[in-house]
Amino acid sequence: MTETTLRAGRVDRRTAETDVSVALTLDGTGKASIATGVGFLDHMLELLARHALFDLEIKVTGDLHVDQHHTTEDCGIALGQAFAQALGDKRGIRRYADLHLPMDEALTRVAVDISGRPFLVFRTAFAREKIGVFDTELVREWFQAFAMNAGITLHVETLYGDNQHHIAESCYKGLARALRHAVEVDPREGGRVPSTKGSL
């Protein structure tokens, strides 16, 4: 990868339940244009873009007359696919990252390995079923869809917290900050794939 190579992905996903368009640039400034029809999800994805310094455009038309599940899950799928596309063969990246992300009284630990082996460990519990009108169980559904389609190993664990909005926000911000570091180009790698196998 050269300095002029644009690490970007674009995915259009259409099903009988949703129509999702995603455009992602990894080496961005945090610009976001998000319109999923689900206000809380829009907010979380705007945070993700801003704290990862990804430029992100997402537009979704979904079957919200049914519920928010398909829109949320398919958004995670498409964004994960765009992320994998943008990374290409993963040459020169740092690959691993972890951090603790505080959000007021909540603290979440996030660890990521851009491994090509999708796996999610999600140890975050919500005391209530809703944040406003958003189903809290859909937070995990989004993370599952994103991790599986991005091809990453992702561990998310909220160590403590009381406010449900803060807990969810700490998960998304933690993911953003971890991805921001993991996708950075490490000049010491010299353009190599960061694996003894030679591929990820």
Image: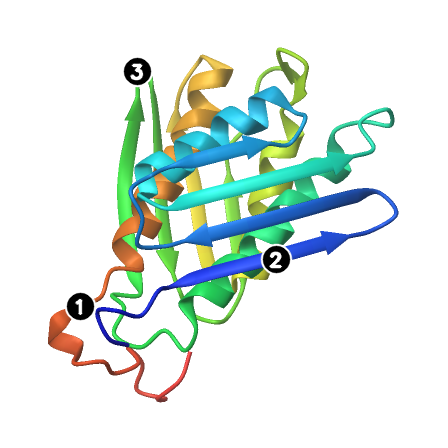
Query: How far separated are the C-alphas under marks 1 and 2?
Result: 27 Å
Dot in front, 1 or 3: 1
Left or right of 36: which side holds 32? left
- Quadrant showing the N terminus: bottom left
For mark 2, what is the residue? 11
For mark 3, what is the residue? 104
Dot in front, 1 or 2: 2
Residue 127, picture quadrant? top right
Query: Disc 3 marks which amino acid?
Result: Asp
Query: How far separated are the C-alphas under marks 1 and 3?
Result: 32 Å
The residue drawn where x is 40% and y is 39% is 49
The residue drawn where x is 37% and y is 34% is 173
Q: Which mark is residue 177?
A: none
Q: How is the image coloured?
A: rainbow
Residue 59: percent from the left, percent from the top? 63, 38
The residue drawn where x is 27% and y is 68% is 93
Residue 128: percent from the left, percent from the top? 62, 15
Q: Point out the tag, 1 or 3, that comes first from the N-terminus.
A: 3
Residue 94: percent from the left, percent from the top? 25, 65
Mark 3: few/some/many CA within 10 Å (<14, 14-19, 20+):
few
Residue 110: percent from the left, percent from the top? 36, 44
Q: Point out the tag, 2 or 3, that comes first from the N-terminus.
A: 2
Tell me if residue 173 comes above or below residue 193 in the rendering: above
For mark 1, what is the residue? 186
Q: Point out the tag, 1 or 2, that comes first from the N-terminus.
A: 2
Left or right of 1: which side holds 190? left
Query: Disc 2 marks which amino acid?
Result: Val
Query: Disc 1 marks which amino acid?
Result: Asp
- Quadrant showing the C terminus: bottom left
Query: Are discs 2 and 3 less than 8 Å apart at CB?
Result: no
Query: How far separated are the C-alphas under marks 2 and 3?
Result: 35 Å
